[in-house]
Image: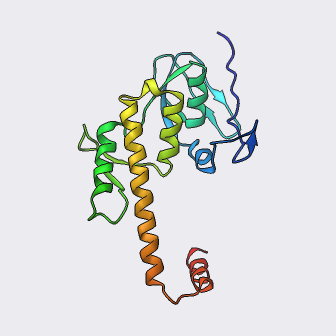
Amino acid sequence: MSSLSLHPPSTNIGNKDNGTVSRYSMQDFLSEDTKVEIVPAFDCPTLSFISCDYGPFIAGMSVPVPLWLALELRKQFRCRITPPPWLCESYLTSVLNYEKDPLNETFFTSSEHPTNPEVQLTLPYHYQSIARALIDVCPGDIERVKSVNVILQDIDFLRDSKSVNILKRLSLSMDGTEGEEVQRNFNMRSG
């Protein structure tokens, strides 16, 4: 078997590279430590990195690895990535329906799995970055990927609109409050 060649992801965050602005953002970087399941197409006892070791890798046996490693192995056709349970059309449709409901002023947090009601699913904090990376690198591993992508875009649009409305209401309720007062109050609560 040929040796594994792993290259770290680009760290070109928002800089120009060959005349184009990189799509890689801080959110993308932070999402890359999220654990995903892969099914390797190779055998290897472990892969050792500074942060920790991953493996053993046995061809055909599922193993959890960080997203960055899964994407790199997938690009080299050394594995298949098992999409996370939340990255399916039925689950994302339930999230979209929640976000569309005008009575829901908060963001969707969790619900039961569409095929297993005993399991609660939540959207990970960086769900958009994780989904975008998986759709870009391994669209064939995701069922009904075009529909999933459209639903994710719709959720993103609805959440953006909801955020703007929340901020508008907040700014109206703070009429007469100075920016410094808000910042000082925020710093006291968060620090």
Residue 72 figure quarter: top right
**What residue is at 52 percent from the left and 16 percent from the top?**
41
- The single residue placed furthest to the bottom in the displayed view is 176
* Number of dots carrying numbers: 0
Q: Is residue 173 left or right of residue 6?
A: left
| Residue 28 image-quadrant placement | top right
Q: Quadrant of residue 68?
A: top right
Q: Of residues 126 and 42, which is closer to you in this image?
A: 126
Depth check, front residue: 66 or 154: 154
Asked whether the viewer can see residue 78, the reply is: yes
From the viewer's side, name the closer residue of 46 and 113: 113
Viewer-proximal residue among 56 and 85? 85
x, y percent for residue 179: 60, 82
Q: Is residue 65 above or below residue 126?
A: above
171 on left or right of 98: right
- Residue at x 42%, y 60% (from the top left corner): 161
- Residue at (34% x, 43% y) in the render: 92
Query: Which image quarter holds the N terminus?
Result: top right
Q: Position of residue 181 (x, y in %)?
A: 59, 86
Q: Is residue 87 visible?
A: no
Q: Is residue 182 above or below residue 112?
A: below
